Image: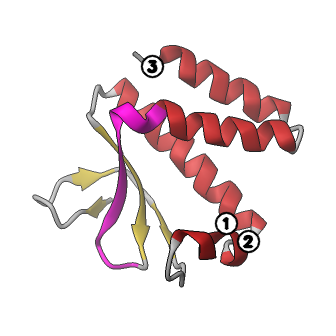
Amino acid sequence: MFTNNLGAKKLSTVQSVHINAIDQSDVNYIVTTTQRENIFQSTIDSISRANTQNQPFAYLMELNYSGNYTAIEQCNWRPALQTILAHYESTENYERCATVHALMGTLA
């Protein structure tokens, strides 16, 4: 279990990722395919867990082993999942598409 720096709330195991990027546009060049898949899966798992637990945020990953976590507000879960779905559609990974569609169906 990790704790965040905001109130020491205990989190389920959250992936740690080390990314050296100055701005968002850099991420497309430095994130490997494996890292991208791990980030997408972490996002799906985190949103699913937060949705099941009726939480207002989904904690996605720890940044550079710093104890700081990226989080996504509930109002942004659907757009995040739509981005992931578009990726899986473009790579013809229909099994993952079905998983994302099912999760989107459970969102309020």
Amino acid, disc 1: Gln
Question: Which SS class for mark 1?
Answer: helix
Q: Which residues are magenta?
A: 65-77
Quadrant assignment for the C terminus: top left
- Residue 65 position, x and y percent, is 39, 78
Report the Cα–Cα distance between label 2 and label 3: 29 Å
- Residue 68 position, x and y percent, is 29, 69
Residue at position x 87%, y 45% from top?
91
Q: Earlier in the sequence, mark 1 or mark 3?
A: 1
Is residue 88 shown above or below 42? above
Residue 96 position by quadrant: top right
- Toward the left, the furthest residue is 7
Q: Which mark is residue 32?
A: 2
Of 101 and 3, nearer the camera is 101
On whether residue 27 falls in the magenta region, the answer is no
The residue that mark 1 highlights is 35
Amino acid, disc 3: Leu
Left or right? Give the position of 56 relative to 80. Answer: left
Residue at position x 32%, y 79% from top?
66
